[in-house]
Each structure stands twice: as structure tokens, then as C-alpha cells.
Image: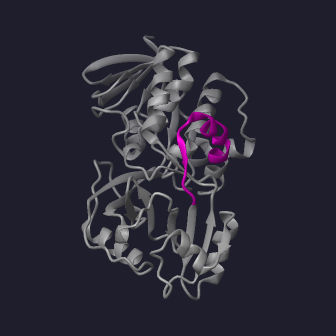
Amino acid sequence: MEHDFLIIGGGIAGVSAAARLAPLGRVLLVEGEENLAYHASGRSAALYAPHYGNAAVVALSQASGEYFQASGTLAPRGLMFVDGPGQRARFETHLHDFELEELSLDQARAMVPILNPETVAYAGHTTRTWDIDTDLLIQNFAREARAQGAQIRTAAPVTRITRDRAGWAVTAGGQVHTARLIVNAAGAWADQIAALAGVAPIGLQPCRRSMARLPAPGGHDVSGWPMVIGGNEDWYMKPDAGAVIVSPADADPMEPHDAFADDMVLAEGLARYEAMVTAPVTRMLANWAGLRTFAPDRAPVIGHDPQAPGFFWLAGQGGYGFQSAPAACQLAADLIAGRAPALPPETIAALAPDRLR
């Protein structure tokens, strides 16, 4: 075999896996686009919120904390939930789940002056949420992978996968590469890659998430504002380089493609945001969308395929790929190396592909 490990996909999952697998053998990563992190990983809200997600996601995110704190990729941001009159029970759920401190309306408006006192009845805040420098994180993992001998090829879409007794032959970018193990980190295309390899898909569903970039509301300095999420989790706002990004928090099922925002979906989300603030949306600087890919139970899929030896899943991260990547790639490397992972057995089982067979 030319390579020990062939990783398909150059987003955060694939690049971090390359860094962790390089000490174990010869690694080749292939990415169909011209650049790494082109699709979902290049369009992320880039937040480390270790309490956000289901139990498996939270376990991975919290296990990633030590790496993040030492990586130089985090900057303080904070997180605020706001909700309207009559929504006390829902608000208290957010207080508990995200370990928020309840704020008075005056305290909340001191942090985010555009909150509408007529529609915002409840607010809670935590400082235990950080911005992630996603480009730096990707480059750190890529440098680490290359320094340990991993090869990374972009503009190399996978068009054919075959298998014999020795291992896999993968045609990517017009060249054939052989490897004893495939790591499927293809994001929205992960089920398609599986089918190409003759492996049964596991029901991964790409879902669109749209974003609009707006000028700083009312000319405010937004640099110190927290990320703000509506109580129904159907919009959020986050400061970004002197402007703000607002998302309708959509999750519309899509086929894998180079995603773009839907004007009506954006308009509806911006209207939900406007209802909770005093600064109307007058113009948009830019908009975009990405595909967040989920397994049926909304937990990532990390592990050997039980029906296809030599085929390893690292997919289904949803919108949590960056904040869970350090622990996810370590788990992948441990499982591939046959080492005992640091994560508890119940978390490993909740992530294993065989739960979906």
C-alpha cells in the first residue's frame, strides 16, 4: 500500500485527523476543492460553546477544552439568550442547560444596547463562550500534519473507490492512490463517498444554515457584545470584525452542493431578529450558507464501519465540528491505533457507527 491512511475531506474533521494520524503511519488527505475548509468549515459561526449540543456533542466539546485553551485560537465572546413575555419556562431551561446568569433588562441592555425593552422580557448570560479563530485552527492542524509527513492534496475530487484483499484504491484528481484504511471525513458528501466505496450509507442529512452580514447596528462598537440567541433558537446574532452576522438558524434538508442562502429564509430570520431589537435592518453587506450534516440522532459518527473493515467514519458533526474537533480527532486516532480512548465508554458508544446499522 502506498499509504496507511487515506483521508477524504479537507474540512476541520479531515485536517485534524491528518495531524493525529500522521505519527501512526503514512497519511494522504484529498480534498476536492482548491482550498481546505471550503464548505461548512469555511462558513462557520466559529464559536466554542462547550455546553451547546446533545450529550455526545457536549462530551466531545468539553474534552476539547484543554487543547483550545493552550492553542491560541480562542478569544473572549460570551453568550446571551433572550426571550419574550410568557416564555419563562423555556428561558429557565436555557438558564440551566447553558449555566447562564440571569440578568435584569437594564443589565442586558448595558451589554447589548439594541435589545428592545418592549419585546425582551428575559435575558441570561455566560462568559464561558469564546470565538474560535477557525482559519488559525485549520492551519495549525495542517502544519502539524505536514510536519509529521502527511501529504495534503487539494483540487482532487474522489471519483472512484475500489477494494481488493490488500486494501483500497482511490481515484482522486485523476490519480490512483492506495491505502489500507479510508477515513471518511467528507462532510455533506460522506454518505456519497460510502456508496462509492460499496459501503452502506448511514443516513447522514446535510441541512442548510444561512448567514447575513450586517453593518454594526446603530453605529455601535459591537466588539465587546456577546453572541445573542433568541429563545426559540430561530435566530442568532454575533459580532464579527466590526459588523454583525445574523442567522435565521435554519436547518432545511438539502442534497450535497455548494450551498447558498435563500432570500426568503434570510428575510424571515432577519424579521425575527428585528422583533427583539430597536435597530432596523436597512442593508446587507453579504450573505452565504453552509451545509451542517447530521446523523438521524444528531450525534457525530466516529468509528470503524462494522460491516466494512478498513472504512472509518468521521462525519456528522452538524454545527459543532470546530468546537469538538480536538477531542474528535483524538478519539479517531485512538480507535484506529487500537488504544483505549480517554472518553467514557457511553460516549464512544453514542458516537459509534454501529448504532445506526
Q: From the image, which quarter does the N terminus lie in?
A: top left
Position of residue 335 in the picture relative to residue 115 (left or right): right
| Colouring | one colour
Position of residue 94 in the picture relative to residue 174 (left or right): right
Relative vertical location of residue 227 with respect to residue 357 in this rendering, above or below = below
Relative vertical location of residue 137 with respect to residue 161 in this rendering, above or below = below
Q: Residue furthest top?
A: 1
Relative vertical location of residue 49 with respect to residue 324 in this rendering, above or below = below
Q: Quadrant of residue 39?
A: top left
Residue 173, magenta (yes or no): no
Q: Nearer the viewer, residue 321 or 356?
A: 321
Q: Visible in this render: residue 231?
A: no
- Tell me residue 94's x, y (percent): 63, 70
Q: Which residues are magenta?
A: 60-78
Q: Quadrant of residue 78?
A: bottom right
Residue 64, magenta (yes or no): yes
Q: Residue at x 47, y 13 (%)?
A: 149
- Tell me residue 194's x, y (percent): 42, 37
Q: Visible in this render: residue 136?
A: yes
Relative vertical location of residue 317 with respect to residue 233 in this rendering, above or below = above
- Tell me residue 37's x, y (percent): 38, 38
- Tell me residue 156's x, y (percent): 29, 27
Position of residue 65 in the picture relative to residue 274 (left or right): right
Position of residue 189 in the picture relative to residue 262 (left or right): right
Q: Residue at x 57, y 62 (%)?
A: 79
Q: Residue at x 61, y 50 (%)?
A: 57
